[in-house]
Image (spheres, helix red, strand yellow):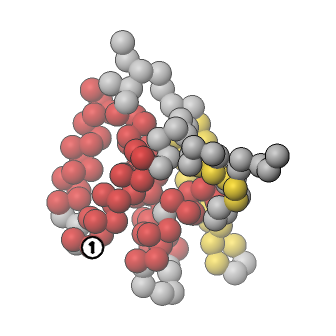
Amino acid sequence: MGSKLKRVKGLHKIDAKGNVIPGKVSELMLDFAAPLIEALERPHSMDDLRRVFMAASVCWNLPVLERTGDPEQVKLRSMLDEAMAKMPAELRVLVKQLLTDREKKYRHIPFLVNLRVEADGSGFRLVAEAREAPKATP
């Protein structure tokens, strides 16, 4: 019988239900943030990439943190909404899409991420760490 997993971009797979099974967290985050990266003018500056991955980590972590029910975490959504109101329309659309992707395509992945962009000899390297999400507040 054939495998029920298929390879997708990066080093992760998709199971028979269509759920992404992460491989390397950095590859998963590169794929997740791809719409923001593609929207950058070329060449990318290190500061541009740091801003992109900061936005991507917020879009990845916020839906998980909101599910905890902690009022402090819920405040983060209003802070993001305020920041989005000041964004150019095309960027706002991309951020909304990342939030939607996190809730639909990646909802089953329970971890939060810490992301860091570092310079390397030929460009940049994304350092990504997964961490356990806080437990839901009763």
**Quadrant in which the C terminus is drawn:** top left
Q: Residue furthest right?
A: 1
Residue 35 against residue 69 in the figure, above or below: below
Query: Measuring 50% from the left and 68% from the top, which residue is drawn there?
Result: 34
Q: How many marks?
A: 1
Helix, strand or loop at mark 1:
helix
Q: Residue furthest bottom?
A: 42
Residue 21 seen anywhere in this rendered image of the structure: no
Residue 130 image offset from top left, x and y in percent: 61, 42
Instruction: Decide which of 28, 72 is in the foreground and name it.
Output: 28
Query: Measuring 27% from the left and 50% from the top, which residue is drawn there?
Result: 80
Residue 68 image offset from top left, x and y in percent: 38, 26
Residue 85 image offset from top left, x and y in percent: 17, 60
Residue 13 against residue 76 in the figure, above or below: below
Query: Measuring 30% from the left and 30% from the top, which residue is drawn there?
Result: 72
Q: Residue furthest front?
A: 1
Instruction: Decide which of 52, 100 is in the foreground and name it.
Output: 100
Badge 1 crowding class, 10 Å Cα cut-off, few under 14, some 14 to 19, many 20 or more, is few
In-image side of 41 versus 31 (left or right): left
In-image side of 114 versus 99 (left or right): right
Query: Measuring 82% from the left and 46% from the top, which residue is drawn there?
Result: 1
Residue 106 seen anywhere in this rendered image of the structure: yes
The three-letter code of the residue at mark 1 reads Glu
Residue linked to disc 1? 90
Residue 20 image offset from top left, x and y in percent: 59, 49
Instruction: Decide which of 137, 44 is in the foreground and name it.
Output: 137
